[in-house]
């Protein structure tokens, strides 16, 4: 039985949570620097909810304060303790390691990404570990955030999966005509009836009208819509709450397709789509959204989807900020687009930021192979 686990509060505290799950201590001592006071409070709330049998104490220690660290160790060195060196201030970790060596105490360092635990005692022992997986919600909460909603239920709609696959299999056709969907002179949305649109066909080419007729017939056959033709105007009523948004919200099909493919990868433990989250409880107004968030062996995967070539450094920066906030340096950052960026420096900048840029051309096997090469590297 481990009496006490000593760990440092950091920007990202997955290693402390995993160590707590691994060693099941009676008590955990958190060493925090003033810089991470908010994180310590967040961790306290998280532990009270998720580790009700573990007592928790927080010690304020300035960076490099050897005497304060010595005092903590001296008070508990006769007990069965483990010191977690992962995270926190590097100088404090080195001081703690030195104290562990002098007092013949056990210290560990956890490499979450490689699933390895280093144990420092009489010698250095290296263990391959299968840690208990953290869910997306755990990772976000431990970083001081909160998921307020997600659109994952849409990814289970068989009709939307079918439509996403059809677009994926006909990308050339989709890119030729998708811009028409956003032209109000063609597709008019009824402000009084949210599930109704009017399609004005007088400015469409014959080829476009023929394609439109095929799509409408298929949707009616699937009982997704009802429609009525009147000269150059078609009135369309949607039979569910989600298809209209799927069609007219840019990139939704790509999110659903990518979520499906991510979920099909056995190494991935969980994936969510359209994740809306808050930075912290104090600023409820600032909401942020990520297209696809997944997790593999407690390491988060953040994916931004762009169904175009009009993405730039701003899109990269946004993805980078979210990933750093909730996943830190361990996280995987991936931008999936259906076209190469207009500006060639974007790819170079993505590489510099550690963001993997994948061009999805509809080939599912190729995409899965690319994802696996990233998350298994």
Image: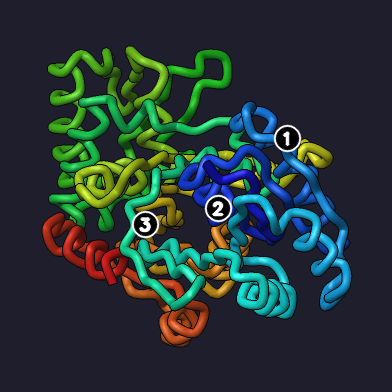
Image-based side of 359 in relation to 352, left or right = left
Residue 285, quarter of the rendered image: top right
Image-based side of 161 in relation to 54, left or right = left
For the residue pair 60 and 49, the one nearer the viewer reads as 60
Q: Secondary structure at mark 3?
A: loop
Q: Secondary structure at mark 1?
A: helix
For image coordinates 14% across by 25% down, the residue present is: 218
For image coordinates 18% across by 42% down, the residue present is: 165
- Label for residue 375? none
Q: Which of the marked residues, 1 or 3, is nearer the chain's N terminus?
A: 1
Q: Which of the marked residues, 2 or 1, is nearer the chain's N terminus?
A: 2
Is residue 72 visible to the viewer in this orientation of the structure?
yes
Evaluate if marks 3 and 2 touch, with contact meaning CB atoms under 8 Å apart.
no
- Label for residue 45? 1
For the residue pair 309 and 352, the one nearer the viewer reads as 352
Q: Secondary structure at mark 2?
A: helix
Q: What residue did someone put label 2 on?
A: 14
Residue 151, quarter of the rendered image: top left
Q: Quadrant of the C terminus?
A: bottom left
Gap in angstroms between the C-alphas marked 2 and 1: 15 Å
- Residue 316, position as x, y percentages in the image: 53, 69
- Residue 86, position as x, y percentages in the image: 58, 66
Q: How busy is the neighbourhood of tag 1: few (under 14 within 10 Å), some, or many (20 plus)?
A: some
- Residue 248, position as x, y percentages in the image: 41, 37
For image coordinates 15% across by 55% down, the residue present is: 364
- Residue 16, position as x, y percentages in the image: 59, 53
For image coordinates 31% across by 23% down, the residue present is: 234
Residue 128, quarter of the rendered image: bottom left
Figure check: 110 above or below 4: below
Figure check: 19 above or below 349: above
Q: What residue did someone put label 3 on?
A: 307
Q: Which of the marked residues, 3 or 2, is nearer the chain's N terminus?
A: 2
């Amino acid at each position: 039985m481990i009496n006490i686990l000593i760990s440092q509060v950091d920007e990202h505290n997955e290693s402390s949570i995993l160590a707590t799950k691994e060693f099941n201590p009676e008590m955990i001592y958190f060493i925090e620097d003033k810089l991470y006071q908010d994180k310590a409070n967040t961790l306290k709330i998280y532990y009270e909810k998720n580790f009700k049998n573990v007592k928790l104490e927080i010690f304020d220690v300035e960076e490099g304060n050897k005497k304060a660290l010595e005092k903590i160790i001296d008070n508990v060195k006769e007990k069965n303790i483990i010191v977690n060196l992962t995270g926190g201030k590097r100088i404090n970790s080195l001081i703690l390691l030195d104290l562990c060596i002098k007092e013949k105490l056990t210290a560990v360092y956890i490499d979450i990404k490689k699933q390895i635990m280093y144990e420092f005692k009489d010698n250095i022992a290296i263990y391959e570990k299968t840690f208990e997986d953290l869910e997306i919600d755990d990772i976000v909460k431990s970083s001081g955030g909160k998921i307020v909603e997600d659109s994952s239920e849409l990814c289970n709609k068989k009709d939307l999966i079918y439509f996403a696959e059809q677009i994926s299999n006909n990308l050339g056709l989709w890119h030729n005509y998708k811009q028409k969907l956003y032209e109000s002179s063609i597709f008019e949305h009824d402000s009084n009836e949210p599930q109704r649109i009017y399609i004005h066909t007088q400015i469409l080419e014959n080829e476009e009208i023929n394609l439109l007729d095929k799509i409408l017939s298929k949707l009616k056959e699937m009982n997704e819509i009802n429609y009525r033709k009147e000269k150059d105007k078609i009135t369309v009523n949607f039979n569910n709450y989600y298809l209209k948004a799927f069609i007219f919200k840019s990139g939704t099909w790509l999110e659903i397709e990518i979520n499906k493919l991510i979920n099909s990868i056995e190494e991935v433990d969980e994936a969510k789509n359209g994740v809306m989250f808050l930075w912290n409880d104090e600023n409820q107004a600032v909401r942020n959204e990520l297209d696809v968030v997944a997790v593999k062996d407690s390491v988060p995967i953040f994916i931004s989807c762009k169904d175009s070539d009009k993405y730039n450094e701003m899109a990269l920066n946004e993805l980078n900020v979210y990933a750093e906030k909730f996943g830190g340096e361990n996280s995987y950052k991936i931008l999936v687009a259906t076209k190469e960026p207009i500006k060639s420096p974007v790819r170079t900048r993505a590489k510099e930021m550690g963001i993997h840029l994948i061009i999805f051309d509809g080939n599912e096997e190729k995409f899965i192979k690319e994802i696996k090469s990233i998350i298994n590297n």
